[in-house]
Image: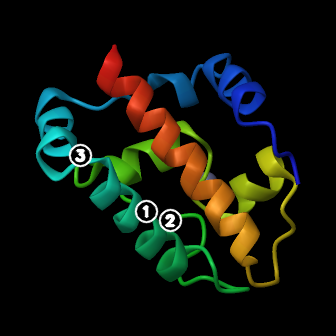
Amino acid sequence: MNKNINQILISLSKSKFRSGFHLNNSMKSYVKDKGIAKIKNDAFEIINKRLKPAFPKNDGKQTPMRQVHPVFISQHACACCCRGCLEKWYKIPKGRELTDEEISFIVSVIVKWIEKEENV
Ligand SMILES: [Zn+2]
């Protein structure tokens, strides 16, 4: 697993597709309202439900593209949207459950990206 968050964020910022995702103003105020601890909690729930299983439901299409929740947008920006992207970007193999360590790492990346967006 590639575990250097800053290095990953730099590589992601060089991808035209990944760097095209941003929080809009209502998403930003949502994050401010709820607080980063709540967002982190939501990220855990979302990853556990949609990415943890060895064979997630609708893998590759399980993460909405619309501005539904800041975590979804961050997942696209950070290539944490499906198991294919996790394998490609993070070297986390498909076809087995994510470990607790992998999940907390993914959550850290997602939250860090959201914090960066908030400060822009
Ligand atoms: Zn994906």
Disc 1 residue: CB within 8 Å of ligand 1: no
Residue at the image position 51 percent from the left and 37 percent from the top: 112
Q: Earlier in the sequence, mark 1 or mark 2?
A: 1
Q: Earlier in the sequence, mark 3 or mark 1?
A: 1
Q: Which residue is mark 2?
A: 61
115 above or below 83? above
Q: Which residue is mark 1?
A: 43
Number of residues whose C-alpha sits closer than 10 Å to that of mark 1, classed few (under 14), some (14–19) or many (20 or more): many
Q: Which SS class for mark 1? A: helix
Q: Earlier in the sequence, mark 2 or mark 3?
A: 2
* Residue 100 position within the rendered picture, expressed as x and y whole percent measured from the top left: 70, 76
Q: Which SS class for mark 3? A: loop
Q: Disc 3 marks which amino acid? A: Gln
* Residue 3 position within the rendered picture, expressed as x and y whole percent measured from the top left: 82, 45
Disc 2 residue: CB within 8 Å of ligand 1: no
Residues 98 and 94: in front is 98
Q: Which residue is mark 3?
A: 67
104 above or below 72? below
Q: Is residue 36 left or right of residue 104?
A: left
Q: CA distance from mark 1 to mark 2?
A: 17 Å
* Residue 37 position within the rendered picture, expressed as x and y whole percent measured from the top left: 33, 56
Residue at the image position 88 percent from the left and 54 percent from the top: 1
Q: Is residue 83 left or right of residue 1?
A: left
Viewer-side label of 1, 2: 1
Q: Disc 2 marks which amino acid? A: Lys
Q: CA distance from mark 2 to mark 3?
A: 15 Å
Q: Quadrant of residue 83?
A: bottom right
Q: Quadrant of residue 119?
A: top left
Q: Which SS class for mark 2? A: loop
